[in-house]
């Protein structure tokens, strides 16, 4: 697949895909004889994984470590540890977001009472 096709399939800009490749998140994208990228099944699977992890809030640095470990045949325990660290970070973010949501709901209720009192 061309970068344009992959861009459309994964709803990512070509620049983002090139960036992911440049920093090592998409290991070895095959190229045609003229140098044009020719994304294969493996490249697309990596891109799908990366998109999913980024959507979940996993940091680029953690993904780079993870992909590097996988490429170098790293221990599964080390790969798992990276994902566990990211899960804990995201859980903390969710807790903070929940607190923020509760404060917003409280304030909205407060203003609802004020508005109802005027009627």
Image: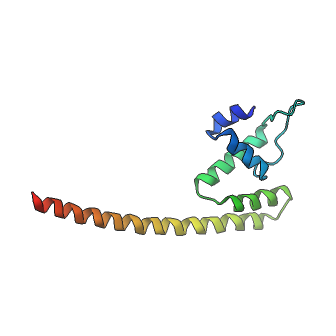
Residue plotted at (78% across, 49% down): 22
Q: Nearer the viewer, residue 45 or 89?
A: 89
> How does the figure colour the protein chain or chains?
rainbow
In the image, is residue 18 above or below residue 35?
Answer: below
Q: Nearer the viewer, residue 73 or 34?
A: 34
Q: Quadrant of residue 99?
A: bottom left
Residue plotted at (69% across, 31% down): 5
Q: Nearer the viewer, residue 83 or 19?
A: 19
Report the quarter where the C terminus lies: bottom left
Question: Residue 56 appears at what percent x and percent y?
Answer: 58, 55
Left or right for 27, reference 106: right
Q: Is residue 85 visible?
A: yes
Question: Which residue is the extreme one toward the left?
Answer: 119
Question: Which residue is the extreme one toward the front?
Answer: 15
Residue plotted at (57% across, 64% down): 90
Residue plotted at (77% across, 38% down): 41
Q: Is residue 46 visible?
A: no
Question: Residue 17 appears at what percent x and percent y?
Answer: 71, 43
Q: Quadrant of residue 87?
A: bottom right
Left or right for 47, reference 117: right
Question: Residue 115 appears at what percent x and percent y?
Answer: 17, 59
């Amino acid at each position: 697949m061309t970068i344009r096709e992959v861009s459309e399939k994964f709803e990512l800009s070509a620049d983002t895909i090139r960036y992911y490749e440049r920093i090592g998140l998409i290991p070895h994208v095959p190229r045609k004889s003229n140098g044009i990228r020719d994304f294969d099944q493996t490249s697309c699977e990596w891109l799908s994984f990366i998109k999913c992890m980024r959507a979940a809030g996993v940091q680029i640095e953690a993904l780079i470590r993870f992909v590097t470990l996988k490429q170098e045949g790293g221990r599964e325990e080390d790969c798992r540890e990276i994902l566990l660290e990211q899960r804990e970070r995201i859980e903390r973010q969710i807790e903070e977001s929940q607190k923020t949501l509760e404060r917003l709901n409280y304030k909205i209720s407060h203003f609802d009472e004020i508005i109802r009192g005027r009627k």
